[in-house]
Amino acid sequence: MSDNDTRNEPVITSYAQAPARTISIGDVTYAYRELGPKGDIPVVFFVHLAATLDNWDPRIIDPVAQGRHVITFDQRGVGASTGQVPDSIEAMADDAYAFITALGFDKVDVFSFSLGGMIAQALVVKHPELVRKLVLTGTGPKGGKDMDKVAGTTYADMLRALVTRSDPKEFLFFNRDAAGKPAARAFVDRLAERTEDRDAEIKIKAFQTQLKAIKKWGRGTPDDLSKITHPTLIANGDNDRMVPSILSDDLHQRIKGSELVIYPDSGHGAIFQYHEEFAPLAVEFLAR
């Protein structure tokens, strides 16, 4: 059971103010935050590689939380969640299922980004009844072309960031051009808007385990995504160096009836660069 009684609280719609909560399942304690009005099907956010609760852009979360119950969480072994990071995407999906059902939900919408999108796909393949709608951003299918090269790109850009004393996300998520550089700085600044009760950083070993899981996923046998009949929104930039943009089109081809949005002059973090366009689109899609 959750160790937090959430009744009679004012509705919080700002991610910077979202209360930190925990729930224990067996010997693992999951850290999560929730905001927005309760009562409807919640939107559960699945975050990216190396990310904790503090890595969600408030300009994406806050508009969704205006009208929906939003839940973000740390995967096992990440941030303030205890336990060890699993070495496969499928095991991460099992954890996500355990977390969602322990909160008492039998139906959710899933909003995912990057590694989160891989976990979301594995979850829907295994538990199609749990998910109503699916948002897949900056991600690709199991066994997709060059999916296993994420690790190499990540390490290279982390080194570039170290040399220039920047946040690695400025290189990994954004183009290094006139549009991308200011968008990157603005994004990193927004992630710092929450000043109190911030999450613990991911540990190096946990990060490396996540990378290994992505590589395994990239080299795995593709899942039959034609079985996914859920309304699905897919989004990316036209120059994603981490999870190549062509993989978003690949997902779109595999998931019948899915919608695809590709933003120009942007990379892996296109939804953050184009948050003014994307957030309302996502809100409308989830409300449909």
Image: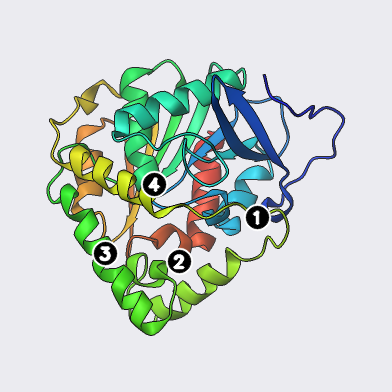
Residue 15 tag number: none
Q: Nearer the viewer, mark 4 or mark 3?
A: 4
CA distance for labels 4 and 2: 27 Å
Tell me, yes or no, whether the two marked residues, 2 and 1, touch with CB atoms within 8 Å. no
Instruction: Please tell me which of labels 4 and 3 falls first in the chain.
Output: 3
CA distance for labels 1 and 3: 25 Å
Q: Which residue is mark 1?
A: 198
Instruction: Please tell me which of labels 4 and 2 falls first in the chain.
Output: 4
Q: Which residue is mark 2?
A: 273
Q: Which residue is mark 3?
A: 155
Instruction: Please tell me which of labels 1 and 3 falls first in the chain.
Output: 3
Q: Position of residue 162 (x, y in %)?
A: 37, 76
CA distance for labels 3 and 2: 22 Å
Q: Which residue is mark 4?
A: 206
The reply to whether residue 266 is visible in this rendering is no
* Relative vertical location of residue 10 with respect to residue 14 in this rendering, above or below: above
Q: Answer with left or right where residue 1 lies relative to residue 237.
A: right
**Quadrant location of the N terminus?**
top right
Residue type marked 4: Ala
Q: Secondary structure at mark 1?
A: loop
